[in-house]
Image (cartoon, coloured by chain):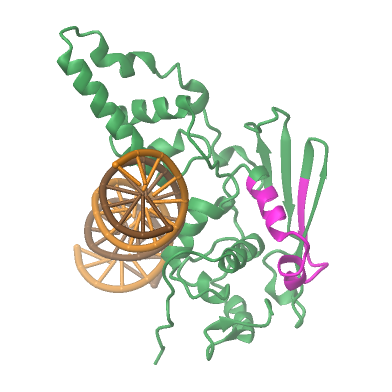
Chain colours: A green, B brown, C orange
Amino acid sequence: MVRQPYQKKGTWTPDEDQKLVAYIIRYGIWNWNEMPRFAGLQRSGKSCRLRWMNYLRPNIKRGNFTREEEETIIHLQKKLGNRWSAIAARLPHRTDNDIKNCWNTRLKKRVILQNNNSASSATTETSSSVEENSSDDDCSALLNTPTTADFPEPFAYSNPFSPSDCHQTMEVDLPNFPAMADFPESLTYGSTFSSSGCHQTVEVDNSCSMKETFDSSENYWEKLSFLEQQLMTDVSDCEAVSPSSQLWHSRHELYYDPADDFWVKPLI
DNA sequence: AAGTGGACCAACCGCGGGGAA
DNA sequence: ATTCCCCGCGGTTGGTCCACT
């Protein structure tokens, strides 16, 4: 009988974030339901997916929405309704959850207010101000968002939206990436980061231990922040691994401790 | 200083779609 | 054709922060 592991809820801790990011960087996304177990997380797959998609994903723009973005959301909401994922697809680097929150907390009231004002006004010109003032052309810069299909290699990223307007490239090189059979028993891997001018790279290799890199390195979160800033396409689109193989599962059995519901060796 | 209410945001829940078996 | 499983979406909730009284 398979014991249903305890599944934690609530706010994610930095340690959990670290485990999830480290795992996804290393292995990609293959099965959200199975992933938390292998990543040493006591979370549901849905929770992991949500955390990744809404917060940890590298290409997420955080912080206040600009006036232009807000107008775009209003325009698109009017056009598409509450299809937040469709709206998010047209707003670079904003998540559907963020857009939904923005709408529910701010924009909806603003629109209602605008509508009330226009309704109370005898004139008709203001009633369609949003529609008229934010045509598709007006927000074309936002709508012409590159899709992940524009990026030929799973781990090579270009960032046309870099704040500094310089073209930045992120390369994540994962040698032996899915080859579980190649992992030594004392599984070691990690990431090194380098930056030079506008061309910045991220390399993930097997040269240092995961623990060393993410636990005792001087600034893991600095690096993660770097990832967040520079990885400008969806890592989830990366084809990472073939976990369905018997090899995958058999190798993971070596590292997963069912007694603790924790994936021990690779991370500890 | 303490209480209160609103704003904001992260996360959860339930449902439906789509693909695989 | 049917069932099952996974994923993604949208609605909603709960916690935190902050301004105001």
Task: Give how far across and how far down residue C18 sits, in percent.
Answer: 45, 44
Residue A196, by quadrant, is top right
Q: Residue at x 46, y 71 (%)?
A: A43
Q: Is residue A53 left or right of residue A14?
A: left
**Image quarter (top left, top right, bottom left or bottom right) of the C terminus of chain A:** bottom right
Task: Give how far across and how far down residue A156 sits, in percent.
Answer: 69, 45
The magenta stretch spans residue A205: yes
Q: Residue at x 49, y 29 (%)?
A: A66
**Image quarter (top left, top right, bottom left or bottom right) of the N terminus of chain A:** bottom left
Task: Give how far across and how far down residue A234 sits, in percent.
Answer: 57, 47
Q: Nearer the viewer, residue A137 or A250?
A: A137
Q: Residue at x 79, y 67 (%)?
A: A206
Residue A241 visible in the shown view: no
Q: Nearer the viewer, residue A110 or A215?
A: A110
Per the rendered image, the range of residues in magenta is: A201-228
Q: Nearer the viewer, residue A31 or A164?
A: A164
Measured along the vertical axis of the image, is residue A249 above or below residue A152?
below
Total number of numbered discs in the rendering: 0
Residue A160 visible in the shown view: yes
Q: Is residue A60 left or right of residue C15?
A: right
Measured along the vertical axis of the image, is residue B8 above or below residue B2?
above
Q: Residue at x 53, y 64 (%)?
A: A30
Q: Is residue C6 left or right of residue A182?
A: left
The magenta stretch spans residue A262: no
Measured along the vertical axis of the image, is residue A186 above or below residue B20?
below
Residue A47, by quadrant, is bottom left
Measured along the vertical axis of the image, is residue A105 above or below residue A259?
above
Task: Give how far across and how far down residue A180 sits, in percent.
Answer: 68, 73
